[in-house]
């Protein structure tokens, strides 16, 4: 059985007057059926560029994104349209991602219209099933986005993402704008839908406790690259990459002392440091780290890290 | 621990004009901040935490109703000060930092100009002396290479550094109280931890009291001595930070802790289901009768819908507004 999503060596480079920004620089991972892969990293690490590249809103400079075994960049337009249905996205801002002039019913039937599916009556039927699936009353369909709270709007966005029965949903900071009590409702809904609608998620968030809670595996990104990929619990128990240690210690303030580093600025993406991109901030950096760039390598079963000394430090 | 009160608020009511008369977004709030103490206010959007801070600073628009039995800061009655007197307190006696470090600095002024202007606004010092002080302040907030960075414009600084500059500005006149409204929300987690640590260290160095406002219960509890939980404009619970976590007394606080993903995944990797708080925060102009939390409360009884519960003692210097505590 093929994985629903395989990202292979994706690079996204932007040319700017000051030089090339390497927003993504060789990211590879695969998502298993029913799996949730969490993506964490500081602002500017490429999380959102990755999300956009996966759903096809951003064309990669090189590399491939395979959905159900089809490379979307090489495929014909017809196959692309067909396969795009498999992958949908939920955005951070539930206020900005719904057209304020359309009724909820119209917003939810739009995916069917775009893909030319069903008759008008069938679509009405599907739409009322969708709204029920995300826990909203069916009289919501005649109302417009401004009549709903942030949490309800995010439910509508999820319903829209579910419309074409995708196998993968990319959530880019999907709960970050919500209050804690509402966030819990949405997280529970996403976990329920994983079972009932047979979904896998790429779950992007800057909130580490949300990532830990939701993810089966976690991918830690730094300056457009994956520096660690590991099962969530193993990563939380013992991170291998010093950057992952740094991130996790920021949450658990008891552990911070050992990881102090005076230089804690994220380096420029136009001129990333030579050698390991993290070495200017790394308390364990040795001579080798200044010159030789570590590749992402397998450290143990299901665990990968891009550090020369992974497993020996910390 | 008995500390002399620096800021004392009693029966604070803040209202905005709304379509249907007046919406009271803060009701009967009592709050005391002692000298050198860190008090956290936690609440979701619409809980009234930020307007409370703005009311203390008298920064709310003049159309707002602000009423209180007491709004005392040191020797000053903040409600009855003239604009001119208030200007002397704002920035000098009370400093404030905001969530958005990008927009709180003037993009056409250098870091140094910001600091020098603030220092000279409140104290009769020469430009040169103020600049020397400004460099020291930047050093105090751990900005590397302050002699050089002082002449940078805000856009050249990262988000974390801008927030450091904001803190330096707020501390430039050695205020007795620092109000920090979501000071780390816009920052990355690694930077967040540094800013919190900085606030803690500065409190120690400068002896300033901090009123820390945030939606993040864990963040607040990590540095606050005392935490006030607000819901829909009312104080529902107040307790020492660790008491609040160990034995939350109000159903809303219990709900918040149960809804937070942190720690909900056991060491065995099993996810405990998050506890949802059904429904949502009521609007200021459409409040339920009785207890404000009653429509969402799992323990609600008839009485909660009729009368508003006062604050009951809930053990160890804690209090909560819930009828269930009446008997205990």
Image: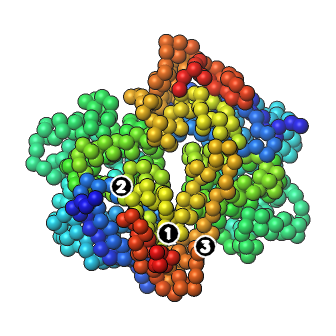
User: Which residue position holds label 2?
Assistant: B225
Q: Is residue A76 visible?
A: no
- Residue ID at (57%, 56%): B260
What is the spatial separation of the Cα atoms under label 3 and label 2, in whole angstroms? 29 Å
Of residue B189 and residue B101, the one placed in the foreground of this image is: B189
What is the spatial separation of the Cα atoms under label 1 and label 3, in whole angstroms? 11 Å
Q: Exactly how many numbered labels are in the figure?
A: 3
Residue A72, relative to residue B91: is it above or below?
Answer: above
Q: Position of residue A169 (x, y in %)?
A: 74, 48
What is the chain identity of the residue bearing mark 2?
A: B
Of the numbered discs 1 and 3, the one sitting upstream in the chain is: 1
What is the chain identity of the residue bearing mark 1?
A: B
Residue B242, picture quadrant: bottom left
Q: Position of residue B106 (x, y in %)?
A: 33, 47
Left/right of residue B302 with respect to residue A158 in the rendered view: left
User: Which residue position holds label 1?
Assistant: B250
Q: Are marks 1 and 3 in contact (CB under 8 Å)?
A: no
What is the chain identity of the residue bearing mark 3?
A: B
């Amino acid at each position: 059985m093929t994985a629903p999503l395989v990202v292979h060596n994706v690079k996204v480079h932007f040319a700017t007057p000051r030089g090339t920004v390497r927003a993504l620089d060789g990211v590879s991972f695969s998502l298993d059926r029913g799996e949730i892969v969490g993506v964490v990293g500081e602002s500017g690490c490429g999380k959102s560029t990755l999300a956009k590249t996966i759903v096809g809103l951003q064309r990669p400079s090189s590399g491939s994104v395979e959905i159900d075994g089809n490379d979307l960049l090489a495929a014909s337009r017809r196959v692309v349209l067909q396969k795009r249905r498999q992958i949908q996205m939920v955005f951070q801002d539930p206020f900005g991602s719904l057209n304020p002039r359309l009724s909820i019913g119209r917003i939810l039937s739009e995916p069917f219209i775009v893909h030319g599916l069903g008759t008008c009556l069938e679509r009405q039927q599907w739409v009322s099933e969708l709204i029920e699936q995300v826990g909203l009353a069916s009289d919501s369909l005649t109302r417009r986005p401004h009549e709903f709270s942030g949490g309800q709007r995010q439910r509508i966005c999820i319903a829209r993402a579910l419309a074409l029965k995708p196998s993968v949903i990319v959530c880019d900071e999907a709960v970050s704008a919500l209050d804690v009590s509402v966030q819990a409702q949405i997280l529970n809904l996403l976990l329920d839908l994983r079972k009932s609608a047979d979904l896998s998620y790429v779950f992007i968030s800057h909130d580490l406790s949300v990532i830990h809670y939701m993810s089966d595996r976690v991918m830690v990104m730094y300056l457009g690259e994956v520096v660690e990929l590991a099962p969530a619990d193993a990563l939380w128990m013992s991170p291998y990459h010093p950057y992952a240690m740094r991130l996790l210690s920021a949450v658990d303030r008891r552990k911070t002392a050992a990881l102090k580093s005076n230089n804690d600025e994220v380096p420029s993406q136009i001129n990333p440091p030579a050698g390991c991109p993290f070495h200017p901030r790394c308390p364990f950096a040795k001579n080798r780290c200044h010159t030789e760039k570590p590749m992402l390598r397998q450290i143990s079963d299901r665990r990968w890290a891009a550090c020369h000394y992974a497993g020996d430090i910390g | 621990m008995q500390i002399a009160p620096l800021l004392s608020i009693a029966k604070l009511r803040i209202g905005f004009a709304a379509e249907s008369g007046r919406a009271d977004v803060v009701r009967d709030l009592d709050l005391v901040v002692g000298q050198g103490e860190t008090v956290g206010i936690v609440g979701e959007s619409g809980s009234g935490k930020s307007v409370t801070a703005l009311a203390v600073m008298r920064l709310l628009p003049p159309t707002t109703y602000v009423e209180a039995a007491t709004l005392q800061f040191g020797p000053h009655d903040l409600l009855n000060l003239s604009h001119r007197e208030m200007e002397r307190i704002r920035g000098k006696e009370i400093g404030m930092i905001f969530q958005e470090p990008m927009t709180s600095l003037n993009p056409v002024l250098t870091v140094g100009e910001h600091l020098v202007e603030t220092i000279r606004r409140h104290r009769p010092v020469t430009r040169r002396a103020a600049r020397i002080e400004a460099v020291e302040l930047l050093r105090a907030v751990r900005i590397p290479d302050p002699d050089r960075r002082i002449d940078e414009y805000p856009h050249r600084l990262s988000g974390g550094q801008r927030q450091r500059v904001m803190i330096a500005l707020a501390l430039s006149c050695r205020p007795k109280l620092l109000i920090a409204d979501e000071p780390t929300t816009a920052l990355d987690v690694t930077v967040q931890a540094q800013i919190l640590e900085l606030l803690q260290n500065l409190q120690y160095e400068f002896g300033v009291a901090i009123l820390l406002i945030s939606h993040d219960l864990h963040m607040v509890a990590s540095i606050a001595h005392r935490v006030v939980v607000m819901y829909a404009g009312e104080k529902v619970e107040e307790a020492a930070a660790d008491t609040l976590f160990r034995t939350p007394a109000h159903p809303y606080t219990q709900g918040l802790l149960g809804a937070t993903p942190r720690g909900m995944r056991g060491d065995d990797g099993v996810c405990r289901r998050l506890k949802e708080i059904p429904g949502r925060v009521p609007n200021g102009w459409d409040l339920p009768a009785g207890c404000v939390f009653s429509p969402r409360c799992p323990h609600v009884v008839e009485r909660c819908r009729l009368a508003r519960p006062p604050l009951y003692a809930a053990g160890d210097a804690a209090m909560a507004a819930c009828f269930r505590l009446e008997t205990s």
